[in-house]
Image (cartoon, grey):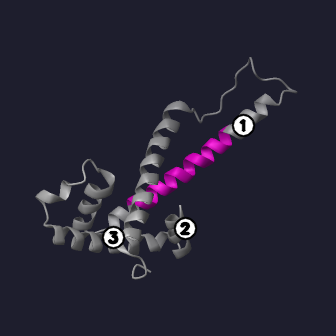
Amino acid sequence: MEKHLTLKQKDHVARKIYKTYQRAQLDILYLNQHYNYYPQVDMFKVKDTSSSYHNGDEKMIKQLERKQKLESFVGIIHQIHNHLSKDTYEFIEHEYINYYQASWWMSFYSRASYYRMKHRALDEFIECIQIFWSEEEILSLLES
């Protein structure tokens, strides 16, 4: 599939995935800090006929499901990182994860080497992504 995508499209897919990855990490941190997932009984809210107590259960279940989905997504990205070569991971880390300035590569690569490395890294990244997601799921990232 990576032969069908241009460099710009591959870059868009990678940026979208890493934006979602960083947001998922922040959401997991927030959920861990602000939600207590152990069963609790608030004696002032518990009534036999009250529906507010049941809504709390539904809310907790939705939050648990959301947290599990986020952790699953972050786990997939970590597995992808484990399958990448050292050079590819370092490039992706500079370009997408810890992106602080656009000209980070000037001290490491010439312009031609940078684009050659970018092609190689994104091809390897897309190849690893295909293990976990279908081609349709990857192409749907281009539409948004």
Q: Position of residue 85 (x, y in %)?
A: 26, 69
Residue identifier under label 3: 122
Three-letter code for the amino acid on which mark 1 is drawn:
Asp
Which quadrant, please, contains the N terminus? bottom left
Q: Earlier in the sequence, mark 3 or mark 2?
A: 3
Q: Is residue 139 magenta?
A: no
Q: Which mark is residue 140?
A: 2
Q: Residues within 10 Å of mark 2 (few under 14, many from 20)?
A: few
Q: Is residue 72 magenta?
A: yes
Above or below — where is 40 with respect to 44? below
Judging depth in this view, the residue of 43 and 72 nearest the camera is: 72
Q: Earlier in the sequence, mark 2 or mark 1?
A: 1
Above or below — where is 106 with respect to 43? below
Please tell me whether mark 2 or mark 1 is closer to you in this view. Answer: 2
Residue identifier under label 1: 57
Which residue is at 78% across, 29% downward?
52
Q: Residue furthest right?
A: 49
Query: How many numbered marks are there?
Result: 3
Q: Position of residue 18 (x, y in %)?
A: 40, 56
Place residue 109 in its image quadrant.
Answer: bottom left
Three-letter code for the amino acid on which mark 3 is drawn:
Leu
| C-alpha span from label 3 to label 2 | 17 Å
Above or below — where is 14 with respect to 34? below
The residue segment tinted magenta is 60-78
